Amino acid sequence: MDLQQQETTLTDANASSNKRLIVSALGSLYATLHDGVETLLRVVAGLALVTHGAAKIVDPFGATEMVEGLGFYPGAFWSPLLSATEFFGGILVAIGLLTRPASFAAMIVLLVTVWFHWITVGQGYSGAEKSILWAAIFLFFAIRGGNRHSVDARIGKEF
């Protein structure tokens, strides 16, 4: 199913869901805002990841000890990979290019931070809560893709 077929299916689903709304007049508002809000979420998530990775990309080996402390050896391999995933992956997610693989990689990084905060540091849910939310957001885009307001849609190809 190509992106336009997915959008049509989504639009059809939105139209049929209007019948189930408590306030049916809101259906057109939801349908109008759907793509824009989804795009905003993707851009914000991507830029947040870029911001988090900006310090790491300047010194890609700076997190070597940290990643080795999590059990990822050799740190000289994993630290630059972490830096690139956060910085360049965030850019890709924000513009919607290779959205699915970039989002999947970001989700994996965030699941590691869930493990770190919950298990390694022993903070439990309260320490891992933000990472869980961010991982869920990136899971959404790993499955959904970039939508029609993305570079993927512009070039007519998706991963």
Image (cartoon, grey):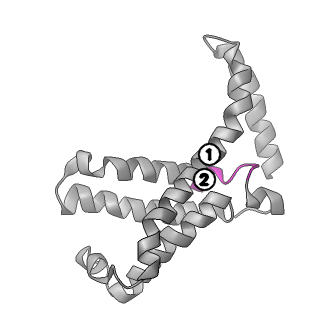
**Which residue is drawn at the image coordinates 32% and 79% (left, top)?**
72
Q: Is residue 90 left or right of residue 11?
A: left
x and y percentages locating residue 82 in the rendered image: 43, 74
Q: Is residue 122 left or right of residue 109?
A: left
Circle 2 residues within 10 Å: few <14, some 14–19, many ≥20 = many
Relative to 15, residue 42 above or below: below
Q: Is residue 1 visible?
A: no
- Contact between labelled residues 2 and 1, with CB atoms less than 8 Å apart: yes
Amino acid at dot 1:
Leu
Find residue 62 and report its image quarter.
bottom left
Q: Which residues are magenta?
A: 141-149
Classify mark 2: helix, strand or loop: helix
Question: Depth check: 58 or 7 in front?
Answer: 58
**Which residue is drawn at the image coordinates 50% and 49% (left, top)?**
137
Q: Which residue is mark 1?
A: 40
x and y percentages locating residue 99 in the rendered image: 64, 60
